[in-house]
Amino acid sequence: MPLHPRDALFDPDEAAVPDLPVCDHYAGVEARMRKSLALQAELGPVFDVTLDNEDGAPVGGEVEQAHLIASLLGSAANRYGRVGVRLLPVDHPRFAEVLAVVLGATRAPAYLMLPKPRGLAELQRAAQAVDAAGGAAIPLHALIETHGALREVDAIAAHPRVESLSFGLMDFVSAHRGAIPQSAMSATGQFEHPLVVRAKLEIAAACHGHAKVASHCVVTEFNDLPALRRAAETASQRLGCTRMWSIHPAQIRPIVEAFTPSRAEVDQAIEILQAARAADWAPIRHRDTLHDRASYRYFWQLLVRAHRSAGVGSALLPAEVRRAFFDENAT
């Protein structure tokens, strides 16, 4: 029987990229947290929910926010276990207390987002604190939003506890003390200012170099869905991001759709991979184009992206393709 693509096309020692949903939805107000969890229960785990204990918490109310988050983590509303938590910065005076409350939840978070590290040393300190508090099995995500973090982004991406890096657009622009105009925080301007685009590209390159997930930042104009769709398509198709933040429920579906391959792309990938598998993964000719294992890897990863989008992807992938490539017993 022909080898499965993951066995035929990849070095067994090659690190696998974490299998994360393409949308990371943030909520910090209790009503919005509950609404987000209800929407995830309805749509399925096509997006993660991140409960925000940093910017979403009232100043001075961070510990109370942590108790609310812990109760939601352990509730029946957390149906799929795809709920993460954004912690406080590691140098915040309540970091340790909030961390202890969150890790004391009856169900562990899917990941912990570490905001505002000023470099590798701070990320290491936060990771050590998480591990010492009993969270060693929980993946870490980090926000690249300071000059120091961007300067050391490759080392941060290489950290073995890190699963994904996100770009913190608003804090990054503010860190330039007015040298970057406000327009660079907009849905359009963030793709035009050279310093902002450079930061996004460096984050994406570091993530791909270390088999981590590059997550694109927010679009704050949450009622402008055409602008959101353009931003999501640009992030996915031009900037190498494989995940994106949502800050309003209306943004979730457009982000999932933008990061899901088109039917034409999926159909082409299926044709090429089926022909390649029939040829025992030797080179083939498909519509007057030659393909070998290098291009097979691309098309396989495209199918994985389609499958990852759950409801959307299941409509794109025929049942026989799902059975052949994605059933637990597929070989």
Image (cartoon, rainbow, N blue to C red):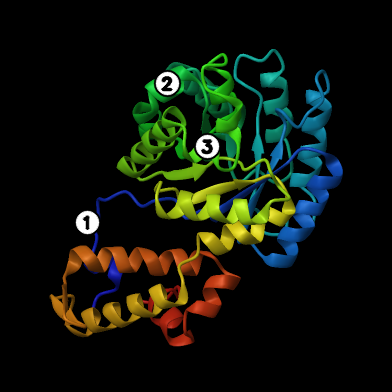
Q: Is residue 1 visible?
A: no
Q: Is residue 226 above or below residue 28?
A: below
Q: What crowding class fits label 3: few (fewer than 14 Cα within 10 Å), some (14-19), or many (20 or more)?
A: many
Q: Amino acid at mark 3?
A: Gln
Tell me the tag on residue 11: 1
Image point 54% across, 29% down: which residue? 131
Q: According to the image, label 2 marks what residue?
A: 120
Image point 72% across, 21% down: which residue? 97
Q: Position of residue 113 (x, y in %)?
A: 59, 35
Q: According to the image, label 3 marks what residue?
A: 190
The outermost residue toward the right is 31
Front in this rendered view, residue 235 or 92 = 235
Q: Is residue 128 above or below residue 235?
A: above
Q: Amino acid at mark 1?
A: Asp
Q: Nearer the viewer, mark 1 or mark 2?
A: 2
Tell me the SS state at disc 2: helix
Image point 54% across, 49% down: which residue? 231
Q: What crowding class fits label 1: few (fewer than 14 Cα within 10 Å), some (14-19), or many (20 or more)?
A: few
Tell me the SS state at disc 3: helix
Front in this rendered view, residue 292 or 85 = 292
